[in-house]
Every structure is written in C-alpha cells, then in structure tokens.
Image (tube, rainbow, N blue to C red):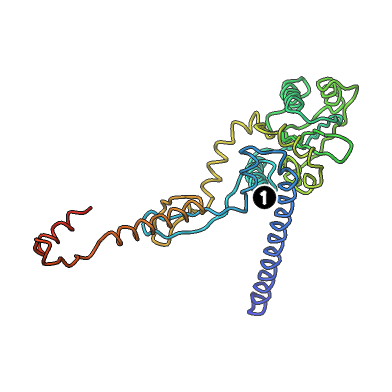
Amino acid sequence: MVTPGLIAQVVKERAKAKVLREKRQRKLWEDHGDWHETIRAKLDGLFEDNQFLNFSRCGQEDFTCTCQNCGTVRRLKYQCSLKWCPRCQWRRVEQRQRLLALWVARIKQPKHLVLTQRNFQVMTSSAIRSHRIALAKMRRTKCFEKVRGGCVSVEVTNEGRGWHLHSHWLLDVRWLDMASVSRTWAKLVAQDFAIVKVMDCRERSYLTEVTKYVCSGAEMAGWQAEKIHEFVRAVKGKRFFFPFGSLFKDQADIRRALNAEEKEPMMCECGCGKFRFQNAVDSEVAAILRECETARRSSSVRKPVPVSATDGKSGREAQGCLAAIP
C-alpha cells in the first residue's frame, strides 16, 4: 500500500537526483567551456578563417530573438555547430543515440565491431579520404555479406604516438568470421595484419562507443597548437558517420518518430511562433541608430521665430516660410 511517508521519500529522492543532475550538467558545461577556450587560444593566429571565427563566437556572442507579434526580445547564445567544437558535439551525439536506440529495438542481433589502423605522423584530408574509401569497400566484401544493415562512426585520437584512425560499427548480423574480417581489413589498409574486435551489444552499452565524438574536447585541448591546426584543417568538410543497409532505409521513419516526440517549437508568451533573429551587437547598433533618427526628427521641428516690424513681412507670412522648410 502506498503511504504518505513513501510518497514523501520518493519525492525527496527525485528532488535530490534532479539537483545532482543539474550540478553535473553545469560542471560539464564549465569543462566544455574551458576546453573550448584552450583550443581557441592555441588556434589564434594559426587558423584565421570563417570556421575559426564561428568557433570563437560559440558560447561567447549573444544574438537576439524578437517576436514578430508583440516585440518581446530574448537573448540567446551563438552556437557554431562544428563537429569538433566541445560546446556543440553533445547535440550531435544525442541525436545519433536516439536514432540508434530506436533502430536497435527493431533488430535481434546487434553487434559492435571495431576496426583499427596503424598510427601515422601527419594528418591530412587525403588520409581521412583513404580511410573512408577502405570502409566503403569493407561493406562490400564477402565477410560482410550476411550484414543486413548498420552504421559506422570514425574516431580520431592522438596520444603522442601519432594519429590513430579507427571505426566503430553497429551491425545487424548474427555472426561474423573475425579471422576473415581481420585479413580483409588489413589488406584494404595495406597492412600485414590489423587489430579488430567484435562485441555483442544486446545489453545496449554500444551507444557510448558507436556515437562517440570525432575527437573529445579534453584530448584535443591537450594537443600542441600545430597538431590542433593540422586536425581541424584535415577534418573540414568530412563526414564521420555513415548509415547503410536497413538503417539507411529505416532512418527516415525513425526520424519522423523522433520529431513527433520532440517538444513543441519555441513559442512566445503571446502565442506567436514567428521570430526575427539578429546578432546582439547589430541589433544594439540598430536600436541606437533608430533613437538617433528619432531625436534628429524631433529637433528638426522648429518653433516660429518672431518677425521684426521692419522686415516688411507679417508674422503669418513668416510662419508659412518656416512651415515650408523640410
């Protein structure tokens, strides 16, 4: 029987859990902010293009959101949405986790496969392209013929022994011949052998690994400035997550289901859902200019000036002349 004491205890525990969760979220945001500023300081002077400018503005610059109906103004933080930004990566990961969680619920034999490649010293866009080509070829080999679908996520690390590219696969397959997988992958990346491993992920621990960041903010912040610059130039414009097979076919339906679960779009208190977004600095300048224009117009309205009797003009004629002045 549910007693008032039990209800009070449950409510108290839930309140404690909420406070702890909020503290963790604040700590995570602070850590991401520290990593972001460390990376920004190291790239300053090395990476002066639009991508770096957007990265520098992330979390620092405000923009305004103005309701087109009542004129209510909100201030929001700018987000760069770069795949390697410590402040923006979590959104990408969260979206993928939700997508994969719903897809895995539809299959019976999910497997987590990891393919590795030997370290190399210089990170270039061609090195990433070659790795992606090898991944695409791997999907079409004989050892993958029983795979019904899945996805592959590429991760980049550098722990002081060179760049390490490896991939995490989530596969809908009952069984894999790992000896054949190892030989095939080694041949595709021009190696004598390759380290590979597979894990059954029916306990759903796969999400953390398969949806990892391209590179963690903590690790990236610890690199030398030249290495960070080398990395961000190489990954620019490159994809690191690829669905295929049954997941590629089902992702449209899954995304529609996710969109149906999402909360309603941002609404103003007046009930309007249409907003005008503007950079906070620009909107502030525009407001100042509007005030200056209003002041100029009000000062341009002059009072009638008394006319001397010796001018030869009546006061009414003088007022008519003043009224003609624009």
Q: Is residue 219 above or below residue 5?
A: above
**Residue toward you, 124 or 119:** 124
Q: Residue at x 71, y 47 (%)?
A: 40
**Residue toward you, 83 or 303:** 303
Q: How many marks?
A: 1
Residue 186: x and y in percent read 85, 23
**Residue toward you, 7 or 193:** 193
> Pointer 1: residues within 10 angstroms few (<14), some, or many (20+)?
many
- Horizontal side of 198 relative to 305 (left or right) equals right
Residue 245: x and y in percent read 65, 28
Q: Residue at x 38, y 53 (%)?
A: 68
Q: Is residue 146 visible?
A: no
The image quarter containing residue 194 is: top right
Residue 249: x and y in percent read 59, 31
Q: Residue at x 65, y 29 (%)?
A: 244
Residue 228: x and y in percent read 76, 40
**Residue toward you, 166 or 33:** 33
Q: Is residue 3 above or below residue 228?
A: below
- Horizontal side of 116 relative to 43 (left or right) equals right
Q: Is residue 268 visible?
A: yes
The residue that label 1 is drawn on is 87
